[in-house]
Amino acid sequence: MTADVIVVGAGPVGLLLAGELCLGGINVTVYDRLTAPTAESRALGFNRRAAESLGQRGLLSRLGDFRWGPMGHFGGVRINLG
């Protein structure tokens, strides 16, 4: 097996990078220290910038309907955006 690019880490950033490279025709291999997906939630939601990025790739509409809440956080400190 050969790869043009090796991405280390199958977290959100690594998987997004691997996906973008694949869309560009690059042969990508992703390595992660875990041998299987975890059973814990790593992302209960996403922010407006993440939605914007998904929208730019034409992927946001695949998620169906959702609503934005008035809460956010910075460094774990909850912020009321209302």
Image (cartoon, rainbow, N blue to C red):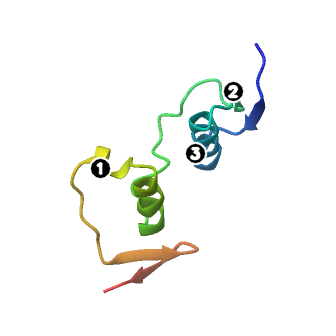
- Report which quarter residue 27 is drawn in: top right
Q: Which mark is residue 27?
A: 2
Asked if the residue under mark 1 is in contact with the one under mark 3, i.e. CB atoms within 8 Å, the reply is no
Please state which of the two labelled residues, at mark 3 or mark 1, is closer to the viewer. Answer: 1
**Which circle's residue, 1 or 2, is located before the other in the chain?**
2
Q: Which mark is residue 16?
A: 3
Q: Which mark is residue 26?
A: none
> Which residue has dot 1 on it?
61
Which secondary structure lies at badge 2? loop
Asked if the residue under mark 2 is in contact with the one under mark 1, i.e. CB atoms within 8 Å, the reply is no
Determine crowd level at label 1: few under 14, some 14-19, many 20+ residues with C-alpha closer than 10 A: few
Q: Residue furthest front?
A: 25
Residue 71 drawn above or below residue 27: below
Of the residues shown, which amino acid type is indicated by label 1? Answer: Ser
Q: How far from the left and from the top, in percent, is residue 58?
A: 39, 49
Residue drawn at x 30%, y 86% as measured from the top left = 82
- Report which quarter residue 51 is drawn in: bottom left
**Quadrant showing the N terminus:** top right
Of the residues shown, which amino acid type is indicated by label 2? Answer: Asn
Cα separation between marks 3 and 1: 17 Å
- Report which quarter residue 46 is drawn in: bottom left
Determine crowd level at label 3: few under 14, some 14-19, many 20+ residues with C-alpha closer than 10 A: few
**For residue 50, side relative to residue 34 (left or right):** left
Residue drawn at x 43%, y 63% as measured from the top left = 52
